[in-house]
Amino acid sequence: MLNLERVTALEKQAEQTRRDILRMVHAVQSGHPGGSLGCADFLTALFSEVMQRDPAGFRADGKGQDMFFLSNGHITPALYSCLARAGYFDVSELATFRKLGSRLQGHPSVHSGLPGVHVASGSLGQGTSVAIGAAEAKKLNGDKGIVYVLAGDGELDEGQNWEAFMYAGAKGVDNLIVTIDYNKKQIDGSTDKVMNLLDLNAKFKAFGFETFEGNGNCMREVLSVLEQAKAALGKGRPVAFLMHTEMGCGVDFMTGTHKWHCTPPNDEQLKAGLAQLEETLGDY
């Protein structure tokens, strides 16, 4: 059980990540701030507290460590900030986001060997399939590491997800935690209007998953659900975390709308957004 001091430290780190996100996307006038802001708490918790990992000894094959796959690959501003803040590479490298020759491309890439990234991603719908392959490999190799994957709810419009979920349940891939960024928004509008997901919890249960739901923008709740999710592993069923988030969380004018899915803030909007977020660990 984490003490209040540690939870507070993680909250402050997530606050800094939100500043990083705004500054990265603004600097190049390109990127996806909305979903990145919504997932800042989850990714902070995962990389700085929950996962068994060794940033200095990162291995692309994930042997002997937990592994994470970002299926909704467009939210790299959050991923890169959390990797840097957790020690995978120097925080100063965040200033190269989406610039020519940078390791920090718009979607994760593996050609440059960026620590923390196992596979190129962002062709939506594919991440869970890759994560299942990694989880099965760990089982075959007697590796006790856990495989985590994050997918967007809008991404679930892609049919490959459901083939992957069916496989994971049918084959009892019980070293896998699938988290859905359940913000109910996607690039073209609300998920209810674009492609209604109906009862997502019931669907995962029908596919053989142990399911959990929680507030992805409350650090204490994220940590609690992930603790429960880990405890449910190894019992013959994959685990799903339906993580309710707010797109644009932390910046009032970016919440309640899908319009910030891939819209960068201008100078005035950057200033207004940063004014709502405390610089807790120092800007890059």
Image: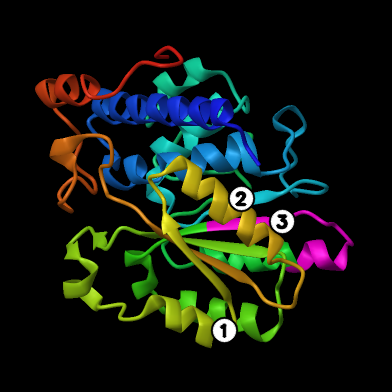
Q: Is residue 195 above or below residue 46?
A: below
> Is there any visible trace of residue 9 in the rendered image?
yes
Structural distance between the alpha carbons of marks 3 and 1: 19 Å
Percent position of residue 7, x then y: 53, 32
Residue at 37% from the left image edge and 25% from the top image edge: 20
Q: Which residue is mark 2?
A: 68
Q: Amino acid at mark 3?
A: Ile
- Quadrant location of the N terminus? top right
- Of residue 197 and residue 199, the one placed in the foreground of this image is 199
Q: Quadrant of residue 49?
A: top right
Percent position of residue 28, x then y: 27, 27
Q: State the mark number for residue 166.
A: 1
Q: Which residue is mark 3?
A: 146
Q: State the mark number for residue 14.
A: none
Percent position of residue 256, x then y: 16, 51
Q: Amino acid at mark 2?
A: Phe
Structural distance between the alpha carbons of marks 3 and 2: 9 Å
- Mark 3 or 1, nearer chain start: 3
Magenta residues span: 136-149
Compared across the picture, whether 27 is left or right of 85 comes to: left
| 137 is within the stretch colored magenta | yes
Q: Sort mark 1 into few (<14), some (14-19) or many (20+) by Cα contacts within 10 Å.
A: some
Structural distance between the alpha carbons of marks 2 and 1: 20 Å
